[in-house]
Amino acid sequence: MDQEQGFCPHRCELNAFPTIDDKPLLMKPTTSPKTYRVKSFGCQMNVYDGERMAEMLGERGIVPAPEGEEADLVVLNTCHIREKAAEKVYSDIGRLTKAGREAGKEPLIAVAGCVAQAEGEEIMKRSPAVSMVVGPQAYHRLPEMLDRAVQGERATDTDMPAIAKFAALPERRRTNPASFLTVQEGCDKFCTYCVVPYTRGAEISRPYADLVTEAKKLVDAGAKEITLLGQNVSAWGGEDEKGHRVGLAGLIHDLAKVEGLARIRYTTSHPADMDGDLIAAHGEIEKLMPFLHLPVQAGSDRVLKAMNRSHTAESYLKLLDRFRAARPDLALSGDFIVGFPGETDAEFAETLALVDEVRYAQAFSFKYSPRPGTPAATMDGQVAKEVMDDRLQRLQAALNRDQLAFNEASVGRTCEVLVERKGKHAGQWLGKTPWLQSAWFEGDAAIGDLVQVELLEAGPNSLSAKLRETVAA
Ligand code: 5AD
Ligand code: SF4
């Protein structure tokens, strides 16, 4: 996809994305870092990007800083989706510089992620301790920037070359049993509250063959489960090895053939891009887990229209019916925003009514946060904080009620759990059920095992379980 260098691909008012700064801003030269820490905030794609940055630093012989020790290089992989998330960057920089000064060595600081993309120049101006600012499409250039930083040069790279970074990243060699694979990036939906189309750019799909290769590498490295990631993952499209056009469903069908891969998930989707093939895939592919994260944002059609969400409450509910018909035990998840500009009490009540109807297994809910440059930030009828607080509390009470009910309804079920980590106590293990519930049990197991358990007792956020048998190590 053609993208004019340094400009927002949509030529919007936010087009002040700075490119690599060739006029070097100087700091004190320093020695090459030996240890690093990558701190990722926000979404799962940031977790994925954080892992890839860590891999690049690893290739250079830089190792993760031991727990409790200050690192020589800190990468803050930031999130810009809501104001609070963005503010964290500056408080983190302050904390790092203070800790570094006290320990007698200030770390090299790189700011990556969506705040870097949106506020690159601002960060450089406000925070002299930062020597590298690198956007989400440019982080493959981090090693180059690091060389310059060691020489005392400060550099900003918020260029948006279409998925060039993937080709430049090292092969996957290490991973968790449940791992992420970015298949699609960017978003063309332009919901009026959202910064993603500006910070992550236009929708772009990674090529089919690259994804199959990366999935196999992840499995070789120990992955049992892969979650396919995209800001709008259901918009993924590509050509398979026979040259046929395939959508996300086709990709999932083919990834399900990868030996050793036991589970596939995908997130996040937009209701407008969910096609019949993807719905059918939930009934056809055993490895595709019975879980769907499908954000609705609000239950009022007027609010949805003002948000530029191309669905109504009714069309969303009908879509869910089709998914449930294909996979009756599907667990549903969603995202909600309360207090969008102009939202009335009656309109908020429609969100609660939708929740009552869907009965989500889990969900994320947020207070509307005005993001500079997005259309909603300047809309009339900004809702008072206290009103938002009250609505969020009421919505979360309903969502928590349903999450607990979903967990309680699972008690007595025998199911498979993928063991992801040790629990707090000796002999305790934590993993995920097919419905993405956290389950813990005691017994003979190891990280990466797929075990059969019986779900015993339900809490709001997890279930206790009894080990039955190990399926595969
Ligand atoms: N304010 C509050 N929540 C937001 N989200 C996105 N932008 C905003 C905003 N400006 C939420 C949406 C989205 C999730 C990732 O974050 O619910 O689905
Ligand atoms: Fe943001 Fe999601 Fe809307 Fe895209 S579809 S603009 S990522 S909320």
Image: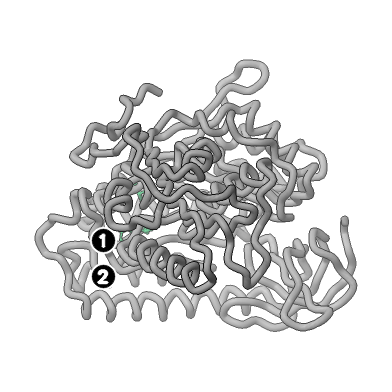
Q: Amino acid at mark 1?
A: Ser
The number of discs equals 2
Q: Secondary structure at mark 1?
A: loop
On the rendering, which quadrant does ligand 1 occupy?
Answer: bottom left
Up-down: is 388 above or below 330? below
The residue closer to the viewer here, 237 or 116, is 116
Q: Residue visible at 35% across and 32% down?
A: 22
| Place of residue 85 in the rendered image (x, y in percent of width and height, measured from the top left) | 37, 63
Q: Residue visible at 23% across and 63% down?
A: 340
| Place of residue 16 in the rendered image (x, y in percent of width and height, measured from the top left) | 24, 39
Asked whether, in this view, residue 115 is left or right of residue 294, the answer is left
Up-down: is 403 above or below 66? below
Q: Amino acid at mark 2?
A: Phe
Q: Quadrant of residue 435?
A: bottom right
Q: Secondary structure at mark 2?
A: helix
Q: Residue visible at 59% across and 37% down?
A: 249
- Separation (CA) of disc 1 from disc 2: 7 Å
| Place of residue 179 in the rendered image (x, y in percent of width and height, measured from the top left) | 66, 51
Q: Earlier in the sequence, mark 1 or mark 2?
A: 1
Residue that carries the numbered disc 2 in the rendered image: 348
Q: Please rate how many residues cluster around mark 2, counting C-alpha atoms within 10 Å: few if below 14, some from 14 to 19, many from 20.
A: many
Give the number of the disc on residue 264.
none
Residue that carries the numbered disc 1 in the rendered image: 300
| Place of residue 331 in the rendered image (x, y in percent of width and height, measured from the top left) | 57, 62
User: Where is the N terminus found, in terms of image quarters?
Assistant: top left
| CB under 8 Å between discs 1 and 2 | yes
